Image: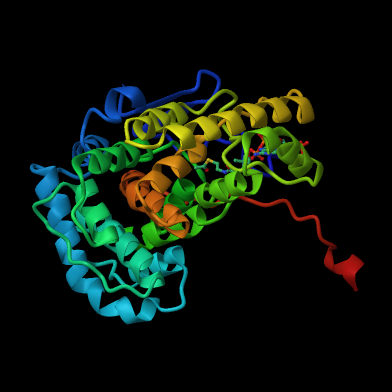
Amino acid sequence: MSIGLDDVIAAETVLSHVDGEAGRLIVRGHDLEELAGRVSYEDAVALLWEGFVSLSDPRAALGNGRARAFALLSGLAPRLHGLSPVEGMRLLLAALPDAEPDHAPLAVGAAAVAAAMAVRGAQGLPPIAPDPAAGHAADLLRMLRGEPVEEGDAKALDTYLVTILDHGLNASTFTARVVASTEAGLLSAIVAGLCALKGPLHGGAPGPVLDMLDAIGSTDRAEEWLDAAIARNERLMGFGHRVYRVRDPRADVLKGAVSRLKGRDNRIAFAEAVEEAALRVLARRKPGRRLDTNVEFYTALLLEALGVPRAGFTPLFGAGRTAGWVAHALEQAGTGRIIRPQSRYVGPRPAEAA
Ligand code: ACO
């Protein structure tokens, strides 16, 4: 028995493959490095959805999805008061009916609209309507910031969204597949995926990465601070992974994307120094564990550089990953088989309990 289901194969998929020993991510037959920064998010979504959802004009389909979602969701802006961005996003997505037609592009459009609305709503700011003709990443950033977006920033977010599009049977994707297997509906599967993503051991890590960098403060304190954190039995955010035993390939793709943004050199140099110290501390304190940098470390630097508030990092992750959840939910639904594992009962038997 494996408590964390480490070695259990629970699905066959054509969507993506994580090779944890080689540090390689394959999406629909392509290495991540062939896609991120080279094809737009819209085209990457169309590639991922091949055979599940046909998009003749992916940019228009997602633009239309954003516009339809805004029409359905904008009236809920007052309800966001007092909620964190990820809670607000969860509320908004939960408000969408499962029976909406053309639900796959609607789900991705809604995730972008909901992420931006929820980040603004948490700051008491009103929602910004989408521009259906714009690129998905550029429009998401504009809806979030409420002002025009420079091409370089839009490109960096586009690279991020492609990088986190899909990633095997991670916790949120598995959750989405379980819900889809009950035929609950696509949007229900997406809401469930977001709920699983929210936790700090999964998609909730990048905000705490910046908190950790703040607490460390300066390069010369890094090793001592990190060592003390491990001594307190804390986990270093942005390090370790259930599948990767080497460096997560997404880390370098995102490090490259943030390096191309202007004015980030000092911040990147500091982060690199902390990363090196963390890897030394982990190798010393957790020998044999093979813990390395994961996607969240440079996600944090990238989203910080784009001016996204920390509490908005997980909603943006969810906005990008929704297309992956959609594909997995449709693939799972196609099997026609409910996911229903078994547990081993270790409680008392009735005679013993009496
Ligand atoms: N810092 C310190 N120790 C760690 C870390 C870490 N980041 N990650 C794992 N370990 C330790 C565990 O405490 C455990 O040690 P022990 O056996 O002495 O108790 C050992 O390494 C086991 O590790 P794994 O089995 O490889 O880890 P697991 O698969 O259980 O957890 C996880 C993976 C949850 C990602 C973990 O590495 C972690 O908590 N990382 C920090 C949070 C984080 O960055 N999350 C984002 C992950 S990427 C993503 O989901 C998008």
Residue 227 place in picture, x, y as percent:
76, 37
Closer to the camera, 335 or 168? 168
Q: Quadrant of the N terminus?
A: top right
- x and y percentages locating residue 250 in the rendered image: 43, 31
Task: Find residue 163 and report its image quarter.
Answer: top left
**Rendered location of residue 242, percent (x, y):** 59, 35
For the rendered model, the colour scheme is: rainbow
Which of the four quarters of the rendered structure image does ligand 1 lie in? top right
Which of the 4 image quarters holds residue 145?
A: bottom left
> Which quadrant holds the C terminus?
bottom right
328 up-or-down from 196: above or below? above
Residue 110 appears in the picture as rendered: no
Nearest the viewer among 343 and 73 is: 73
Horizontal placement of 114 versus 192: left or right?
Answer: left
Q: Is 243 displayed left or right of 64 in the figure? A: right
Foreground residue among 4 and 73: 73
Point out the residue furthest to the bottom here.
Answer: 78
How many numbered circles are shown?
A: 0
In the image, residue 269 sits, relative to residue 96, either above or below, namely above
Residue at image position (15%, 43%) is: 54
Q: Is residue 344 left or right of residue 80?
A: right
Which residue is at 36% across, 52% downward? 307
The percent coordinates of residue 350 (x first, y second) are 84, 68
Task: Name the residue rendered at 21%, 50% in the picture.
Answer: 149
The image quarter in which residue 187 lies = bottom left
Does residue 188 show up? yes
Residue that lies at the very extreme toward the top in this rendered image: 22
